[in-house]
Amino acid sequence: MVRVEGDELVARARTGDEAAWAELYGDHAERLVIWLRHVHHPDPSADAEDIAAEAWLIAARRVADFEGDRHDFAGWLFGIARNVSRHSHRASRTRRTTALGPELLEVSGSGSTDPAPRVAGDDLARRLVRTLPEREAQVVACIDVVGLDVATTSRALGISTTAVRVAHHRGLRRLRQRLAAGASAGDVTPRSAEGM
């Protein structure tokens, strides 16, 4: 597939060009799901893949209103996903659902014969990030988990770049403190590794 520069790609996506949408999807789909798995999920029944799919549908319907280039698209898409997640939480408060945790549902192959260490590490990372205040968890997941830059994270979360930097600094500091406290107390073992 030939890569196209940002503005032309977004312009083609606006006209419904399937190849342009496929390229944008290839750029962001996996990162979006990973980010959604790491941020606070006020609604435990909300599946990251379902929220991401809903965000993509909304993006397809609203792409004509989008102003920006290929780089800006990530922030816009992540912002839509954040709003979908919040809406899902509001809806769940009325239906009072209880879902199984991701540790019971999620095991994906990584090419290695024993996925246990990777799954245990992913579980620990998710649990640690979820202990952070919501804004810090979202910023750490954007920057450190899926690799968005500060400007894209700012757009995705609807906060200033200064607020992103502050939340990132505070979140990483809290994570270091929790890891140090957990290591000294022997409480850093991921749940999925317990009982092995």
Image: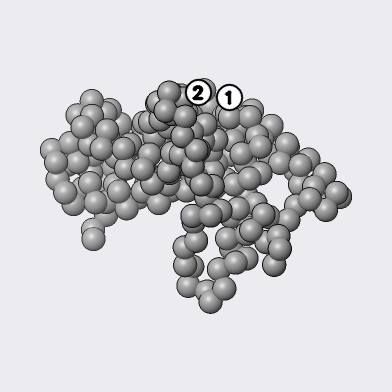
Asked whether residue 40 is in view, the answer is yes
In the image, residue 113 above or below residue 16: below
Residue 143 occupies quadrant: top right
Task: State which quarter of the image contains the N terminus.
Answer: bottom left
Q: Position of residue 116 (x, y in %)?
A: 60, 66
Q: Position of residue 103 (x, y in %)?
A: 56, 53
Q: Secondary structure at mark 2?
A: loop
Which color scheme did the rendering employ for the protein? one colour
Asked whether residue 153 is in view, the answer is no
Q: Amino acid at mark 2?
A: Ile
In the image, residue 191 above or below residue 169: below
Name which residue lies at 73% across and 56% down.
189
Q: Which residue is denoted by mark 2 in the rendering?
A: 159
Q: Is residue 5 left or right of residue 16?
A: right
Q: Which residue is denoted by mark 1 in the rendering?
A: 163
Q: Is residue 33 left or right of residue 144?
A: left
Query: What whole-number distance in Å separates the C-alpha atoms at marks 2 and 1?
Result: 6 Å
Q: Amino acid at mark 1?
A: Ala
Q: Position of residue 84 (x, y in %)?
A: 38, 31
Residue at the outermost right position: 184
Task: State which quarter of the image contains the C terminus.
Answer: bottom right
Name which residue lies at 43% across and 44% down.
48
Residue 168 occupies quadrant: top right
Q: How would you rate the neighbour count of disc 2 (Cα within 10 Å): few for under 14, some for 14-19, many for 20 or more?
A: few
Q: Secondary structure at mark 1?
A: helix
